[in-house]
Image: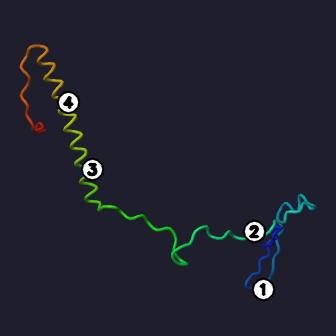
């Protein structure tokens, strides 16, 4: 392929076929050649070795430890929310001069 879009194909039998772009037929005086590509820019930073690129980030701690921390944080948040709700129920019962419901730490069996 040439810069003006002309495509030359040579078959295995030795025949050559040249195809010009349609713009050549519609606009014969139109110059469709393109400038050569600019040279590549030099790298901005030095790499460790010729074939090295960006490395995959490494974990600061294992997945199991990260998962355990997430679970512990979630359980603490759930316990804090349950304590807040329990305190609101007790305050409401005292305001209505009732005895507060018993505190069962286990969830219902269903």
Q: Is residue 41 above or below residue 81?
A: below
**Quarter containing the C terminus:** top left
Task: Name the N-terminal-most of marks 3 and 4.
Answer: 3
* Residue under the point 79% across and 69% down: 36
Ranked by sequence position, the earlier of labels 4 and 1 is 1
Residue 14, above or below 68? below
Residue 26, image quadrant: bottom right
Residue shown at 50% from the left, 67% from the top: 54
The 10 Å Cα crowd at callout 4, few under 14, some 14 to 19, many 20 or more, is few
Cα separation, mark 1 vs mark 3, equals: 69 Å
Give the number of the mark in front: 1 or 2: 2
Element carrying mark 3: helix
Which mark is on residue 100? none
Is the residue under label 3 in contact with that under label 1 (CB below 8 Å)?
no
The answer to the question of whether label 3 and label 4 lie on touching residues, with beta carbons closer than 8 A, is no
Label 3 and label 4: CA atoms lie apart by 21 Å
Q: Nearer the viewer, mark 1 or mark 3?
A: 3
The spot of residue 79 in percent (x, y) is 19, 38
Label 4, label 2: how many angstroms apart (C-alpha)? 68 Å
Residue 22 locus on image (x, y percent): 83, 61
Q: Nearer the viewer, residue 75 or 28?
A: 75
Residue linked to disc 4: 84
**Which residue in the structure is indicated by mark 3?**
70
Marks 4 and 1 sit apart, C-alpha to C-alpha, by 87 Å
Q: Earlier in the sequence, mark 1 or mark 3?
A: 1
Residue sticking out furthest to the bottom? 13
Q: Which mark is residue 14?
A: 1
């Amino acid at each position: 392929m040439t810069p003006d879009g002309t495509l030359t194909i040579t078959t295995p039998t030795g025949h050559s076929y040249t195809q010009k772009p349609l713009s050549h037929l519609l606009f014969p005086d139109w110059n469709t050649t393109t400038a050569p590509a600019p040279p590549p820019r030099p790298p901005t930073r030095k790499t460790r070795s010729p074939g090295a690129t960006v490395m995959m980030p490494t974990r600061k701690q294992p997945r199991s430890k990260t998962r355990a921390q997430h679970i512990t944080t979630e359980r603490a948040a759930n316990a804090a929310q349950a304590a807040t709700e329990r305190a609101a129920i007790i305050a409401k019962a005292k305001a209505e001069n009732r005895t507060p419901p018993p505190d069962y730490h286990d969830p219902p069996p269903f």
